[in-house]
Image (cartoon, rainbow, N blue to C red):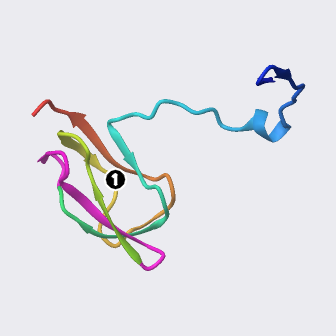
Amino acid sequence: MNIEGVKYKTSLTSKFERRKKWEIPDGTKVYSFIPGTVVKLFVNEGDKINAGDKLMVLEAMKMKNNISVPFCAKIKKINIAEGERIPKEHLLFEFELTED
């Protein structure tokens, strides 16, 4: 490593070398970012949604989180139901991207 012209010898920890490598996320799928309970679903399979539309409310740690979509799409599959407890990184929705 070279910082401001000074060379430093470094080594990586085994934990760092074993870590899961970062991958470009699939933009057609939404995963839960925290474990929680599905309070309300606002969409159904086959619905066309616009950027900013609410998909669901997820309750976690006594807080209700509104989950919305940042793009236009059609809902291909919903993998959850109201009242269901979901773990972290659970696949919630699958989309088909649309242009309008």
- Residue 45 position in % (x across, y down): 18, 49
- Residue 86 position in % (x across, y down): 45, 63
SS at mark 1? Answer: loop
Q: Quick one: 2 or 58, which is closer to the camera? A: 2
Looking at the image, residue 74 lies above or below residue 58: above
Type of the residue with mark 1: Asn
Looking at the image, residue 42 lies above or below residue 75: below
Total numbered labels:
1
Looking at the image, residue 3 lies above or below residue 72: above
On the image, which quarter does residue 1 sit in? top right
Quadrant of the drawing holding the C terminus:
top left
Part of the protein shown in magenta: 44-62
In the image: residue 68, left or right of residue 15: left
Q: Quick one: 52 or 95, which is closer to the camera? A: 52
Q: State yes or no: residue 51 in magenta.
A: yes
Q: State yes or no: residue 66 in magenta.
A: no
Residue at left offset 13%, top offset 30%:
99
Task: Give the class, few, some or many, for how many residues have Cα within 10 Å of label 1's Cα (few <14, many ≥20).
Answer: few
In the image: residue 22, left or right of residue 34: right
**Residue tagged 1:** 79
Q: Quick one: 30 or 11, which is closer to the camera? A: 11
